[in-house]
């Protein structure tokens, strides 16, 4: 079976600690390392490990230091990948119910074309489609 290579940003944001850090920073202008440590609840070593990963992907940065205090902020806002929960995604622009057979048939046709263009090996033959969620950013 061929391997599917995921986007490194999406893969990184699937990790619960990195996701929590990124979401916290999205909701504020900036946080210190100590504040982030309290929000996420991990030890300092793990905190820095995850912040450095987010920083290496260009998502956050340590934008100023005051004495021993480091301040972090988001520098690139990206859609959060689905974490598999049924809760609404803040980046969801629209959700299309596929219970109508005509809508489901149209969605299958569109998805097959997209899969063919992307050269994906996913087969929709044994899949029940329930909902199509459009995720992105409003410009």
Image: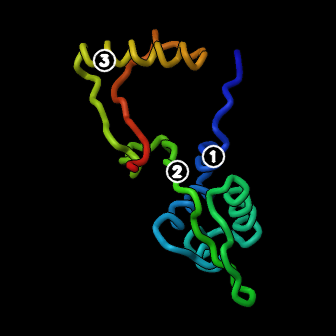
The residue that appears at 34% across and 26% down in the rendered structure is 130
Give the image location of residue 2, x and y in percent: 70, 18
Marks 1 and 2, how far apart at CA = 9 Å
Q: Which residue is mark 2?
A: 78
Q: Label 1: few (<14), some or many (≥20) within 10 Å? A: some
Q: Is residue 65 left or right of residue 35?
A: right
Quadrant showing the N terminus:
top right
Q: Is residue 81 left or right of residue 132?
A: right
The residue that appears at 54% across and 13% down in the rendered structure is 116
Q: Which residue is mark 3?
A: 104
In this orientation, which residue lies closer to the viewer: 137 or 38? 137
Marks 3 and 1, how far apart at CA = 30 Å
Nearest-to-viewer mark from 2 and 3: 2
Question: In what element is the residue under mark 1?
Answer: helix
Which of the two labelled residues, at mark 3 and mark 1, occupies the earlier sequence position?
A: 1
Q: Which residue is mark 1?
A: 9
| Residue 43 marker | none
Tag 3 and tag 1, C-beta contact below 8 Å? no
Marks 2 and 3, how far apart at CA = 29 Å
Q: Is residue 131 above or below residue 9?
A: above
Question: In what element is the residue under mark 2?
Answer: loop
In this orientation, which residue lies closer to the viewer: 88 or 69? 69
Q: Is residue 59 above or below residue 35?
A: above
Q: Is residue 62 left or right of residue 94?
A: right
Which of the two labelled residues, at mark 1 and mark 2, occupies the earlier sequence position?
A: 1
Give the image location of residue 58, x and y in percent: 66, 56
């Amino acid at each position: 079976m061929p391997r599917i290579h995921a986007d490194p940003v999406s893969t990184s944001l699937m990790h619960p600690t990195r996701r929590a850090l990124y979401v916290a920073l999205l909701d504020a202008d900036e946080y210190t390392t100590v504040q982030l440590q309290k929000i996420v609840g991990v030890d300092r070593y793990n905190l820095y490990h995850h912040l450095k990963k987010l920083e290496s992907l260009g998502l956050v940065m340590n934008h100023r230091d005051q004495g021993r205090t480091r301040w972090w902020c988001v520098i690139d806002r990206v859609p959060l990948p689905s974490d598999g929960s049924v809760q609404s995604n803040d980046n969801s622009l629209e959700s299309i119910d596929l219970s109508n057979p005509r809508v489901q048939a149209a969605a299958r046709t569109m998805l097959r074309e997209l899969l063919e263009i992307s050269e994906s090996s996913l087969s929709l033959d044994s899949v029940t489609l329930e909902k199509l969620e459009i995720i992105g950013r409003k410009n």
